[in-house]
Image (spheres, helix red, strand yellow):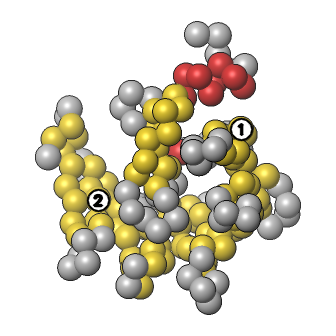
């Protein structure tokens, strides 16, 4: 598959779970234990996911060549992630939800943390944020656009 000048390719296991994604010459590998994503490893960074005995994700480690950041998920009673915090208690990301469970990104830090690096959140070509549910059943459109979020945060005027 080609997207503009980049060639895209994907590989899946027998259960239909993605095991590799290649964009140009950069390949990300996804390591699974049955239906639990254990790791998302790219050429420059990696995510290593932590679960409790019931199979619920508790957090993850984001690792680059220069740093490791342990991230803890803070969930509401419905199991929706409300905050991602560091081990020092700092808020790395915060979310709120409306009645149809669409996340609204309120704050995201550090500034170089890219939504596209999170395997559960992506930014579409149109600038819409999509997220993958806790069970990994596919991405859902949120009808939230980066432009509107940046306006709300006062980071842009147009």
Inter-mark Cα distance, 2 to 1: 29 Å
Mark 1 — residue? Answer: 106
Residue drawn at x 20%, y 79% is: 14
Name above or below for residue 57 compared with residue 101. Answer: below
Please provide percent x and percent y for residue 85: 76, 59
Name the N-terminal-most of marks 2 and 1.
2
Residue drawn at x 38%, y 85% is: 34
Residue drawn at x 52%, y 28% is: 145
Picture quadrant where residue 99 is located = top right
Please provide percent x and percent y for residue 155: 68, 21
Mark 2 — residue? Answer: 21
Crowd class of label 1 (few under 14; some 14 to 19; many from 20; radius 10 Å) = some
Please provide percent x and percent y for residue 92: 73, 51
SS at mark 2?
strand
Res 113 visible: yes
Res 108 visible: no
């Amino acid at each position: 598959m080609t997207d503009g000048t980049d060639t895209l390719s994907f590989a899946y296991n027998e259960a239909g779970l993605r095991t590799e994604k290649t964009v140009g010459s950069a390949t990300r590998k996804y390591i699974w234990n049955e239906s639990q994503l254990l790791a998302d490893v790219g050429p420059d960074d990696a995510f290593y996911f932590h679960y409790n005995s019931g199979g619920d994700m508790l957090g993850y480690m984001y690792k680059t060549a220069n740093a490791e950041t342990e991230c803890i998920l803070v969930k509401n009673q419905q199991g929706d992630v409300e905050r991602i915090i560091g081990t020092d208690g700092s808020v790395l990301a915060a979310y709120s939800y409306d009645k149809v469970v669409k996340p609204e990104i309120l704050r995201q830090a550090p500034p170089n943390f890219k939504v596209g690096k999170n395997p559960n959140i992506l930014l579409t070509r149109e600038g819409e944020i999509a997220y993958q549910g806790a069970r990994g059943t596919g991405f859902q459109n949120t009808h939230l656009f980066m432009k509107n979020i940046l306006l709300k945060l006062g980071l842009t005027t147009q």
